[in-house]
Amino acid sequence: MTSISPYFTPGVLTRNMSRRVCAAAGGRGRDRDRGSNLVKNPGGRWQQPGEGSGRPVCSDAAGQPGGDSVQAEDCAPTNAPRQKRGRLQASSKSTKATGQAQAAVLSADETNSKWEPKDWREQWNNIREMRKVRDAPVDHMGAEQCFDKTAAPEVMRYQVLLSLMLSSQTRDHVTFAAMKKLRDHGLTVESILKMEDKTLGELIYPVGFWRSKVKYIKQTTAILKEQYSGDIPNSISELLKLPGVGPKMAHLVMKIAWNNVSGISVDTHVHRIINRLKWAKKETKNPEESRRALEEWMPRELWSETNWLLVGFGQQMCLPVNPRCAGCLNRDICPTAKNNLRKTNPGLPPSSLRQPCQQQQ
């Protein structure tokens, strides 16, 4: 049995154990010589200030009440200011993080918000109004009018493809005449493969770049026979692999032949008009740039109508040279029309709607 030192006093043991217990609860168990806030009561015992005045009584090493030590949970109130500061700091950080997240969302919304041209809906409706008569060349001699509607489906699709290949850099009435001559000779995959290059050239002349088109038609037709069983591809990626087929043709083929709106078909008319109306964030340099610019903001339900609508408008009203701005319903909301009209007599009354919309050959 271990003997107890004659110098042992219960108070010393209690103070030592108090320091150990309270050190775990926040380091508040040091004695007065070491900076503790313990004080002696009138009876000579060490205690926390305020003990016996309603504050919790600290437990001794055995966990019994009445000792001079302080339980860990009872020491918590002495750390309340520090904990409160911690909670406030955590709350501040959380609020700041929430604010930053909200700002990021708002910033993303602003970045992703769809840009739209000014007055485009009114301009679109006005063009529809001017095109309602449907008397432009594209309405009577465009690609949708060039194929044999009584032929087998794969033959019709092949004729649609060829009409669009011929239409590049060519007026509609020239393409229409060439397609009629080809159809009279039996326009099928087999007939074209059997036809001499010279004969094919004579039939499609005088379409633009007719010599190159003879070569492209023969090469494309051979590919269709070998790889697609005489039909045409039903995807943009496959159509663009065919010789002589570009994006404008491919999207029109998808729409007319496959009844699938895969994108906006943009030719020189559409390209010119969207730059005059400022339907792109910045001026576009070619039809393909114009197509991408339009598809960024134009509602998809309007894509199928865009080519037909704007091509006819470009053939009749928004001409390449000397556009008929005075008779256009958009003359007051078209940036280009305002500039053109300033160069002429600004007081000249606009002409009637029907007069400038006469068919332009």
Image: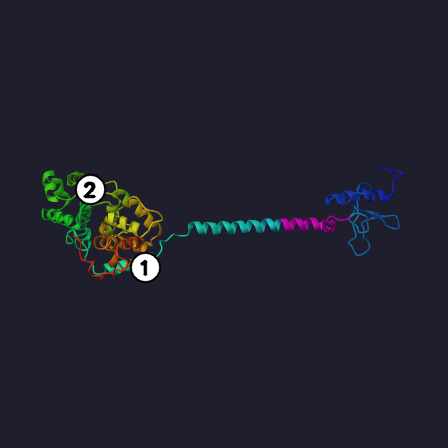
Q: Position of residue 78 (x, y in %)?
A: 74, 50
Pointer 1 local density, CA inside 10 Å: few below 14, some 14–19, many at least 20: few
Give the left or right position of residue 184, taking residue 17 as reference. left
Mark 2: few, some, or many residues within 10 Å (few <14, many ≥20)?
A: some
Instruction: Measuring from the top left, give residue 94's x and y in whole percent.
Output: 58, 50
Q: Which mark is residue 122?
A: 1
Q: Give the left or right position of residue 139, taking residue 85 as reference.
A: left
How many marks do you count on the picture?
2
Q: Is residue 196 one of those drawn in magenta?
A: no
Question: What is the three-letter code of the residue carrying label 1?
Answer: Glu
Task: Please indicate whether residue 31 sits to the left or right of residue 360 in the image.
Answer: right
Which numbered disc covers residue 224? 2
Magenta: predominant secondary structure element?
A: helix
Marks 1 and 2: which is nearer the front? 1
Magenta residues, start to end: 70-89
Distance between mark 1 and mark 2 Cα atoms = 44 Å
Q: Nearer the viewer, residue 140 or 15?
A: 140
Q: Which residue is depicted at the point 44% across and 51% down? A: 110
Question: Regarding mark 1 in the picture, which secondary structure is present there?
Answer: helix
Q: Quadrant of residue 246?
A: top left
Q: Are marks 1 and 2 in contact (CB under 8 Å)?
A: no
Image-quadrant location for residue 135: bottom left
